[in-house]
């Protein structure tokens, strides 16, 4: 009797959570069992080795639905990451560099047996077995159904859309949720890679809530690099990072625009000027 009393609240919360996501009916396919819900306390039961990585992107819960059609199988996973930036972030980190991205949700891609996309606060992953051409067939059709049910917004994070297009490397726009460049005090950042005949560099943007937070970040970075300086003010800095090489930074309002990689001054100046102009309108 005590065991039943203990389980009832858990089972009740599980059913309420499952009710938040209604899996679509897929023509010709039969849902195989109930929707499974995994939260932070039990995500390891679903993706054991990757749980901590998902936690770092503000993971809330995931709904897992399985379907079958004869010997064929299909799995639909809807991950809730709390907000668009974190959902895009984990999608961007798992998206293959060579992916042929398409307008699925905010952005997505498919291969023969998988389809992944991001929309609003959700990262949706789908895969199939023993179903030829599933990516452009049943998975794409199902993705469009799921997308419409999850959100009306097909936006990418605003800073992502502001990265200049010229010379940008395909599928290089990403959001790093914490410990950017391996340094915990840098926190989160958006980044993209750029390439021309002179080499390659990475452009990044760190956004904070106030000028004081930006100043504190820069003070920590300067101290880390062993650079004695007066209190930082808006403007440009060059930091010799012992782990990441020469880093060029510009403090602008509540943003830090930065560059790592090859020293391509002309490209760096062009990109910084364009992005700074766009950020001024935020």
Image (tube, grey):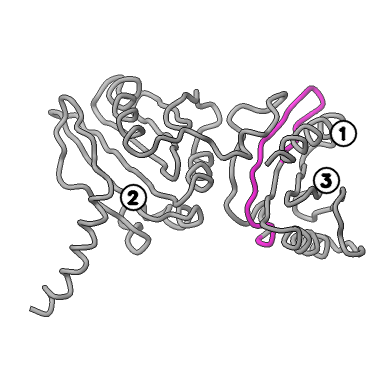
Q: Is residue 202 magenta?
A: yes
The residue sitting at 81% across, 34% down in the picture is 273
Mark 2 or mark 3, earlier in chain: 2
Residue at the extreme bottom of the image, as rendered: 2
User: Which quadrant of the view contains residue 257?
Assistant: top right
Image coordinates of residue 281 in percent, x first then y, are 71, 38
Q: Main secondary structure of the magenta part?
A: strand
For the residue pair 44 and 213, the one nearer the viewer reads as: 213
Mark 1 or mark 3, earlier in chain: 3
Image coordinates of residue 156 in percent, x first then y, are 53, 36
The residue that disc 2 covers is 62
For the residue pair 271 and 223, the one nearer the viewer reads as: 271
Image coordinates of residue 217 in percent, x first then y, are 74, 60
The residue that disc 1 covers is 265
Give, as a single range, the part of the protein colored magenta: 184-203
The residue sitting at 48% across, 49% down in the picture is 83
């Amino acid at each position: 009797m005590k065991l039943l009393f203990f389980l009832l609240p858990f089972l009740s919360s599980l059913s309420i959570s499952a009710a938040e996501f209604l899996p679509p009916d897929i023509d010709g396919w039969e849902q195989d069992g109930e929707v499974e819900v995994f939260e932070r306390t039990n995500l390891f039961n679903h993706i054991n080795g990757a749980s901590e990585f998902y936690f770092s992107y503000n993971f809330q819960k995931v709904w897992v639905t399985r379907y079958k059609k004869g010997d064929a199988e299909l799995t639909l996973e809807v991950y809730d990451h709390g907000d668009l930036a974190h959902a895009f972030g984990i999608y961007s980190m798992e998206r293959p560099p060579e992916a042929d991205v398409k307008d699925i949700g905010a952005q997505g891609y498919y291969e023969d047996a998988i389809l992944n996309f991001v929309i609003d606060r959700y990262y949706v992953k789908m895969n199939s077995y023993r179903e030829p051409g599933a990516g452009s067939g049943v998975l794409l059709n199902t993705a469009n159904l799921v997308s419409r049910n999850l959100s009306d917004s097909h936006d990418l994070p605003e800073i992502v859309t502001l990265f200049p297009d010229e010379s940008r490397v395909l599928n290089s726009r990403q959001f790093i949720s914490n410990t950017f460049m391996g340094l915990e005090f840098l926190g989160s950042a958006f980044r993209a890679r750029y390439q021309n005949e002179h080499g390659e560099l990475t452009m990044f943007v760190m956004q904070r809530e106030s000028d004081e937070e930006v100043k504190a970040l820069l003070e920590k970075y300067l101290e880390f690099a062993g650079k004695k300086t007066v209190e930082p003010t808006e403007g440009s800095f060059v930091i010799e990072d012992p782990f990441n090489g020469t880093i060029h930074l510009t403090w602008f309002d509540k943003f830090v625009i930065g560059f790592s990689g090859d020293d391509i001054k002309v490209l760096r100046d062009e990109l910084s000027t364009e992005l700074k102009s766009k950020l001024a309108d935020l």
